[in-house]
Image: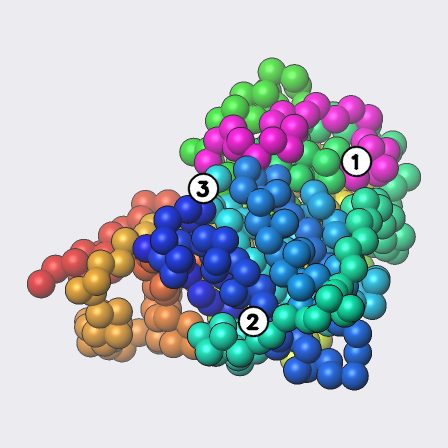
Amino acid sequence: MTLIKSISGIRGTIGGKPGDNLTPLDIVKFTAAYLRFQQQKHQKTALQIVVGRDARISGEMVEGLVVQTAAAMGVNVILAGFSTTPTVEMAVVQTQSQGGIILTASHNPKQWNALKLLNENGEFLNAAEGQKVLEIAEQNDYEFAPVEKLGKINRDNTLIDKHIDAVLQLKSVNRDIISKAGFRIVVDAVNSTGGIAIPRLLKALGVKEVIELNCEPTGDFAHNPEPLPENLTEIAKKVVEEKADLGIVVDPDVDRLAFIMENGQMFGEEYTLVAVADYILQQTPGNTVSNLSSTRALRDITEKAGGKYYAAAVGEVNVVAKMKETHAVIGGEGNGGVIYPALHYGRDALVGTALFLTHLAQKKIKISELRKLYPDYFISKNKITLKPEMNVKQLFEKLRKIYTGFPIIDIDGLKIEFPDGWVHLRTSNTEPILRIYAESVSREKADAYAQKVMKAITEE
C-alpha cells in the first residue's frame, strides 16, 4: 500500500488495487474532488486550471485521466504537456486560472507519480484546503457536467519559454556578466523535463557551452532521481573530464537544484540556497526563511547581512507562509529548493540557476572558491521505515525525556538543539518513513548525533 494523501498532494506507485496505490480510479477520484473544491471556492467563475507534467513513464496516462476528468467536470484546461513544477505555478497566475495540477512525484523513483494541487496564486493548497479535498473525495461529493457543458482543452507549448523570459527580466539576473564569464556547464536532468528547461535557460543566459547529460525526457531515469552525492557519480566524473566550470543537477520536476564543483565534488545541496541568499542579501537586505531541516549556514549569513532568519515547518506551503509573514526577500528549503518572491512563491531551479550564475560570474572565482566563503556545517540524512507497530508520538516522548535540558522545537516533528548542532525527526509527507536529519560542525559529529538518536529510538 503506497497511496499517500498529504499537503504535498496525492502520491503513490502506479498499478495495483484502488485505494492502495495510485490507480486510474484514484486519479479520477482525487482530480474530481480537487475540482469540486475549486468550484465551491470560485462559484461565480468559469473554472480553468493549468495541467503540466514531468517526463516519467506514467505521465501521459495520468495526464489523460486528469485532463478528461476536468473536461467531464465542465472545467477548461490549459495543457502544458512536458513542463516543470515552477513553470506550472507561474502559468496559473499568467493565464489567470483558478488553479493547477502538476503531475510529478518529484524525487521519487519512476514507478511513482502524484497530483500536486495548486490554488489561484500558483501555490500549494494549505493543510485545511488539502483536508477539504480529501473529505470531498471520501464522500464522493462531486458530479459531472452534462454534454452541453463539457470543458475545453487548449494546449500551450510556450509556458517554459515564458518562464525563462520572466527570469531574464529580473533585475537581479545579469545576462551580460554571465555571458562574459564564458561558462562551460554540464547539465544532468535525469531524463526528465529539466532536460528541456535548463539547457534552454542557460543558452538564453549566454552560457558559452552547455554539455547535456541525461537530458532526453524519456522518463526512464538514468539514476535515482534524488540529487544526492551517491546518485551523481556520472556527472561528477563528466565535469572533471570536460574541464567544465560546474555541473547543474535538477530533480524530475525541476524544483530542486544542486551544483557540482569544477573538481567533481558536490557544492552541497544545502548550500544552493545559502549561496543564492548571500547574493540576494547583498542586493536587497532583509529576512530569510528555511525549514527546520535546513542548515544553520543560512541563519549565519542572514544575521551577518543585518537581517533576521526564521525557521518554518517542512513543506513548501509552510515555508511560503512564513516568508509572507516575515516579508522575507529569499527563502526555501535545504534540499536545493530556492524560493524568490520577486518572481513567484515557489521552489524554482530555473531562477535559482540564474541567480547563482550571476553571483558566481560577479565574484569572478571558481565555484569551489565560492563554497569556501560560507560556514562549514555537515548534515547527516537518515531514515527509518515506519512499521505498523511503531508509535511515533511515543517515540518523540521518549526522546523528550532523554534530552531534558536541551531546547526542543515541536512545530514539525521534534528538533533537538545542541550547542554545536541539532537533530530533527519528522515523518515524511511523501513516503512511509521517519526522517532523522542531524547537523554539526563536522561530518563525524553530525553522524554521531544521528546515530545516538536512532539508537535511542530502536532500543526497547
What is the magenta segment's predominant secondary structure?
loop
Between 48 and 362, the one nearer to me in the picture: 48
Looking at the figure, which quarter contains the N terminus?
A: bottom left
User: Mark 1 to mark 3: distance in Å?
Assistant: 28 Å
Q: Residues within 10 Å of mark 1 (few under 14, many from 20)?
A: some
Can residue 426 be seen in this snapshot? yes
Dot 1 corresponds to which residue? 200
Dot 2 corresponds to which residue? 33
Give the structural element (helix, strand or loop) at label 1: helix
Label 2 amino acid? Ala
For marks 1 and 3, give the one nearer the viewer: 3
In this picture, which residue range is highlighted in magenta? 201-224
User: Mark 2 to mark 1: distance in Å?
Assistant: 36 Å
Q: Let me know if residue 49 is in the magenta part.
A: no
Label 3 amino acid? Gln
- Which residue: 48% across, 27% down? 233
Q: Looking at the rendered structure, which numbered label has been put on residue 327?
A: none
Counting from the top left corner in percent of width and height, residue 41 is at: 68, 82
Precedes in sequence: disc 3 or disc 2: 2
Dot 3 corresponds to which residue? 111
Residue 76, relative to residue 264: is it above or below? below
Residue 116, relative to residue 395: is it above or below? above
Precedes in sequence: disc 2 or disc 1: 2
Counting from the top left corner in percent of width and height, residue 334 is at: 53, 55
- Which residue: 75% across, 52% down? 79
Q: Residues within 10 Å of mark 2 (few under 14, many from 20)?
A: many
